[in-house]
Amino acid sequence: MAAKRVLVLDKEQIRKKSTRIAYQLLEDNFEEESLVLVGIAERGYVFAQRLKALLERISHLQVQLIKVTIDKTSSTLNAHTDIPVERAKDKVVILVDDVLNSGRTLAYGMGVFFNVPLKKMRTVVLIDRSHHQFPIFTDFSGLKLSTILKEHVTVNLHEHDGGEDAAWLT
């Protein structure tokens, strides 16, 4: 029997939630001149690129983008960035991913910056599943979704996956 797939966000809903998050980031950082968006590869980075474009359209902020690639199967922090993390020194850093499930990925993403003095760090996810095994919580999310552990959330972002933007519960 095929698994049931339930649409939780369509293309328009993702667009609206992304815009709302961009405005929330602007409000949270209204006194800043610049931000560093750190996207967790792959879909978190695509989402961060979208937020960067939105922030640059609605504000005066200069937004720098860093891509973090994390070995999500490792039991220890094993990550690398596309540019040196020292470029985030004394700046506001926004860690971005598509889905928060256990919190492990965001915890590893934060770990990349432990030796860099930051002004502050915030977290953003498109969907927060609320199954935290780590003390990681989002500052900004598009959707908080209560699920059971055996269910999965799949996000499709056009730039990475092709097709239309959507998120499904399977």
Image (spheres, rainbow, N blue to C red):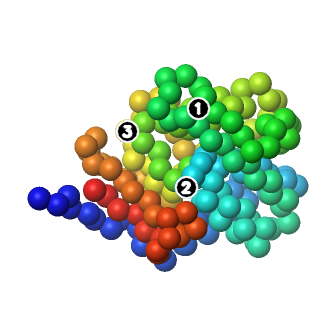
The secondary element bearing badge 3 is classed as loop
Nearer to us of marks 1 and 3 is: 1
Tell which of 62 and 41 is nearer to you: 41
**Residue pictured at 28% horizontal, 41% vertical:** 149
**Residue pictured at 31% horizontal, 58% vertical:** 169
Q: Give the quadrant of the C terminus.
A: bottom left
Q: Between marks 1 and 2, how big is the CA–CA gap?
A: 16 Å
Q: Is residue 31 visible?
A: no
**Residue pictured at 85% horizontal, 41% vertical:** 87
Q: Position of residue 84 (x, y in %)?
A: 81, 38
Residue wearing tag 2:
43
Res. 131 mark: 3
Q: Position of residue 95 (x, y in %)?
A: 65, 45
Q: Amino acid at mark 3?
A: His
Q: Between marks 1 and 3, how big is the CA–CA gap?
A: 16 Å
Q: Position of residue 132 (x, y in %)?
A: 42, 35
Q: Is residue 84 visible?
A: yes
Q: Position of residue 1 (x, y in %)?
A: 11, 59
Q: Amino acid at mark 1?
A: Tyr
Mark closest to the chain's N terminus, 2 or 3: 2
Q: Amino acid at mark 2?
A: Arg
Tell which of 39 and 139 is nearer to you: 39
Nearer to us of marks 2 and 3 is: 2
Res. 108 mark: 1
Category of crowding for the residue at label 3, using alpha-carbon neighbours closer than 10 angstroms: few (below 14), some (14–19), many (at least 20): some
